[in-house]
Image (tube, rainbow, N blue to C red):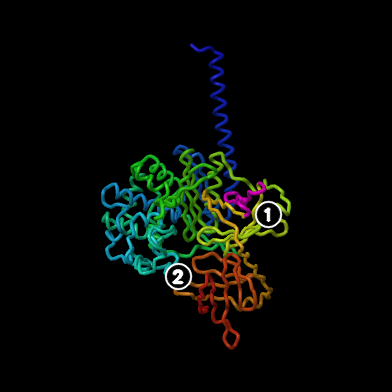
Amino acid sequence: MRSSHTMKTLLFVVFMFFCNVSINAQKLEQQVDELLKAQYPSDGPGVSFLIAKDGKPIYQKAFGMADLELKVPMKTTNVFEIGSITKQFTAVAILMLEEQGKLKVEDDITKYISDYPTKGKKITIHQLLNHTSGIKSHTELPSFLSSARTDMTPQVLIDVFKNEPMDFEPGEKFHYNNSGYILLGYIIEVVSGESYADFIEKNIFEKLGMTSSLYGTMKDIVPNRASGYSSTASGYVNADYLSLTLPYAAGSLMSTTEDLLKWQNALNDNKLLKKSSYEKAIHGSTLNNGEHIPYGYGLGEADINGSPSIQHGGGIFGYTTMGIYLPEEKIYVSGLTNCDCKNITNTTTAIAAIAIGKPFPDKKNAIKLTEAELEKWVGSYEFNDNIFRYVTLENGQLYSQREGSTKLEIYPMSKNNFIFDGGTTSYVFSEIDGKKQATFNTNGQTVIGKETDKAPPTEKVSISLAPKELIKYIGKYELAPGAVIQVTTKENQIFAQLTGQPQFEIFPEQEDIFFLKVVAAELVFDKDESGNITGVTLNQGGRQMPAKKIE
């Protein structure tokens, strides 16, 4: 029999253990609350967020609004379009059919879509799954926005892109590709004899009790649907209409954070797939030359401050989403938002890091470096796929700018380690054999850029135009049926918005010529003999795209 003193000691240790657990949980809740409240105020579009440990929720809250017009606060039960998180459901459905002996991922796609024009190439299901097929992604075609409101069957949707030229030889490169997952959805239908929507409903949602998940619809009533929004310079607007027949097996599912936890738990517990099949999806894959890529089947490998993770996000008109699982810590985090204006990927990554006790650094802890120490890393760096990033120094502040994008501040955490705002993206600079290089880290992925002699782009200088001069450019300009550039003004600012895209400010370089700062593009307005604006030409990426004024 234990002594009274021993029992008291044991009880004290147990008590202290539970106190520490409680304190840590309170600290996590406080940190996550603070982060989410700052990004999702009570009067704006909102977020539903969940953190689970060992398959059980340890944090589940919602902030902001589910419906701005009716002033309905967000709840954790709200249903969102999850965008490309859909791809992991499609990939698992393919692997389920493989386990049933109905297909093999090594099969040529023409075994199931006999009339698909592969142009003499062998394109496999595997290459559709890991985005290495070389097939043109239909969401990159100009016709995508113009047909955003048009319902299409899978066969008609495939017809949109099947005759487009290949981007590269199958298996030679990785290029994220929605067309591949359209074809996968259709293969599921051919092999199973069911529609994609019915297959997912019967074999996944019903089996796992995902009662709030469904194939998306714009017509049917969806209980607890969170309305989708976009952001403009003048405030939030309802997101543009998108027929959910178009994202199809690449992005048309709807769900909740609680249902997505059921899904992740089922994957972890091998309720839908054998462990060996699931591992095909989560450990990346290889190109023809043996090079490893972090994308597997509908899921990607990443690293969060030394901890391996499995993750995928989504973005669709009015919504952005992210889900991350950290197998070593058995932590799952998911964030669903009803605005396509917020970076939920960085937020979810930052919260995942907090949850595993490895938080990202904060710019408020940046150190002070001398002008010479900052100047040391100024230069142009070339990364894979002809991507250039320029590091510049202005008024004691170091900036990074990806070619064709915006200039962003970077903050020193040491003499060679600099972070972007939020801490989830960073540079580590070094010097090898007298040449500088920059290791760029973002969302667990690392790429290395080497110093080049390429000069950074010259920043354009805008001129000042009076508000009464800007008014003449107001109007709608049609690039293609359904694809319209709308130009508006507010006081002394002027904005342009393409159908399905956010609104951006444009800046006058000279009369009738305006440029964008967020991307390398310009708008050149056309006039008739009387000086009336008749159209505009969008110059971007070496293309000249004229648009006639329709209003």
Q: Identity of the amino acid at label 2? A: Pro
Residue 283 visible to an observer of this rendering: yes
139 relative position to 463: left or right = left
169 relative position to 362: left or right = left
Q: Position of residue 258 (x, y in %)?
A: 44, 45
Q: Position of residue 227 (x, y in %)?
A: 48, 57
Residue 425 colored in magenta in the image: yes
Question: Which residue matches tag 2?
Answer: 142
In the picture shown, does residue 199 fall above or below 268? below
In the picture shown, does residue 544 fall above or below 134? below
Mark 2 against mark 1, which lies toward the viewer? 1
Estimate the spatial distance between the alpha carbons at disc 2 and disc 1, rounded to whole Å.
Answer: 43 Å
Q: Nearer the viewer, residue 95 or 284?
A: 284
Query: In which quadrant of the rendered view does residue 274 lie?
Result: top left
Q: Nearer the viewer, residue 474 or 123?
A: 123
Q: Position of residue 224 (x, y in %)?
A: 45, 52
Question: Which residue matches tag 1?
Answer: 376
The residue range painted magenta reads: 414-434
Query: In which quadrant of the rendered view does residue 507 lie?
Result: bottom right
Query: In which quadrant of the rendered view does residue 175 lie?
Result: bottom left
Label 2: how many Cα within 10 Å (few below 14, some 14–19, many 20+): few
Q: Identity of the amino acid at label 1? A: Lys
272 relative position to 400: left or right = left
Q: Position of residue 450 (x, y in %)?
A: 58, 56
